[in-house]
Amino acid sequence: MMILANPKEIDGNTLYYVDINFFTPHQETIYRIWTEKSFLTKKYGHLYLNLPVKNCNIKKCKKDLILKNGDLNLFFVVLESCFNGQCTIDEVICDNPELFFITHYDSKSKSLLISHGALFVLTKSDFVKVKWYKSGRLYGTPSKGNTIFHIDGSIEENIEKVRTNKY
């Protein structure tokens, strides 16, 4: 996933930040992440933070987060919700995860699709396994399962078969 980075001039230096505010009710910023230029990728004439990020660390400030060089990996976890429902993360499995939670809205009206996602998972592991469950109108999609996010950006879905006794 690529998130647009914004430049800001402070005392003659250019600093970069990423605002995380996915269709929140009032478009307020949930997290502002300040980053070094080395973590940014230039594409289409703009700079982007490309997630997941290798060899980094996050310093928590009073209000913002600072992305610096380090020995950890940063993953962005968002799971697709169902119509008139939500997807909730039940468990995150990896080496000593540090989690930053958000509510990610998939629609601007905030009423149709709501995904509950861990904004960032900071870990030493090269993958993050997430157990999740969904509610709402599933229309044949599974109600629970596991998703594995790899450091190379690939994603594996492992859906649990749920037995129902309708008849």
Image (tube, rainbow, N blue to C red):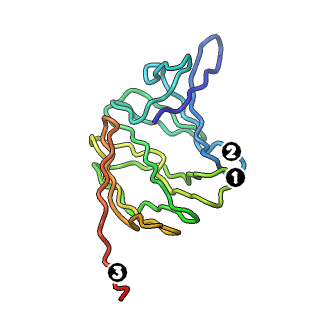
Residues marked 1 and 3 touching at CB (< 8 Å) = no
Instruction: Report the side of 25 relative to 40 (left or right).
Output: right
Q: Is residue 32 above or below residue 110?
A: above
Cα separation between marks 1 and 3: 37 Å
- Residue type at mark 3 is Thr
> Quick one: label 1, few (<14), some, or many (20+) residues within 10 Å?
few
Cα separation between marks 2 and 3: 42 Å
Instruction: Report the side of 26 relative to 135 (left or right).
Output: right
Q: Which residue, given by chain and number where applicable, does mark 3 sit on?
A: 164
Residues marked 1 and 2 touching at CB (< 8 Å) = yes
Residue 145 drawn at (x, y percent)? 34, 62
> Quick one: label 3, few (<14), some, or many (20+) residues within 10 Å?
few
Q: Residue at x 52, y 33 (%)?
A: 3
Q: Is residue 165 above or below residue 33?
A: below
Residue 142 drawn at (x, y percent)? 38, 65
Residue at the limit of the structure toward the front, as seen here: 167
Q: Nearer the viewer, mark 1 or mark 2?
A: 1
Closer to the chain start, of discs 2 and 3, is 2
Q: Which residue, given by chain and number where applicable, does mark 2 sit on?
A: 28
Q: Nearer the viewer, mark 2 or mark 3?
A: 3
Residue 77 drawn at (x, y percent)? 43, 47
- Residue type at mark 2 is Glu
Q: Quadrant of residue 160?
A: bottom left
Instruction: Report the side of 40 relative to 94 (left or right).
Output: right
Q: Which residue, given by chain and number where applicable, does mark 1 sit on?
A: 25
Quadrant housing the C terminus: bottom left
- Residue type at mark 1 is Pro
Q: Nearer the viewer, mark 1 or mark 3?
A: 3
Q: Residue at x 60, y 25 (%)?
A: 6
Closer to the chain start, of discs 1 and 3, is 1
Q: Residue at x 41, y 64 (%)?
A: 141
